[in-house]
Amino acid sequence: QVQLVESGGGLVQAGGSLRLSCAASGRTFSNYAMGWFRQAPGKEREFVSVLSRIGMSRSYVDYADSVKGRFTIWRDNTKNTLYLQMNSLKPEDTAVYYCAASSGYRPTRINEYDYWGQGTQVTVSS
């Protein structure tokens, strides 16, 4: 089991920034690819970003087109924590943000993830 707890959400004006954190415990954090998803009211949960597990010969990082150039994902394995820096926020970024852990390769779909956090609310006002 991997337990994931997100934090860092809040209310911010358009153009502002937030940094989300996802603290992991349980099984070895570095063995999992880690991703961020979001779900806006009335919409399906969607992929935001993914970062490969530690130790891969060819590491990867992917972003949804809607956040490329504005969001940055990284992980600190000494702290068992995943981060998402969100800059130039837009009202359409408003959603509950979830972190998730996957044992798969380059996972971008919900069913490729094994563990999920409870989510943190991000609200961007116009």
Image (cartoon, helix red, strand yellow):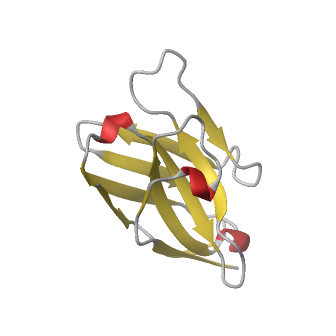
Looking at the picture, does residue 80 appear above or below residue 93?
above
Residue extending farthest to the right is 65
> 18 above or below 77?
below
The image quadrant that residue 21 belongs to is bottom left
Q: Is residue 57 left or right of residue 27?
A: right
Q: Nearer the viewer, residue 92 or 17?
A: 92
Task: Tell me which corner region of the image, top left, top right, bottom left or bottom right, holds residue 13.
Answer: bottom right
Instruction: Give the image location of residue 61, x and y in percent.
Output: 59, 34
Q: Residue at x 39, y 21 (%)?
A: 55
Q: Quadrant of residue 119?
A: bottom left
Residue 47 image position (x, y, % from top left): 65, 56
Where residue 15 appears, as percent x and y from the top left, is: 65, 64
The residue lying at 66 percent from left, 44 percent from top is: 63
Q: With 77 as the anchor, is 55 left or right in this view? A: right
Q: Is residue 71 left or right of residue 78?
A: right
Name the residue: 60% across, 66% down: 38
Q: Which residue is pictured at 41% across the width and 72% down the height?
A: 118
Position above or below: 45 against 112: below
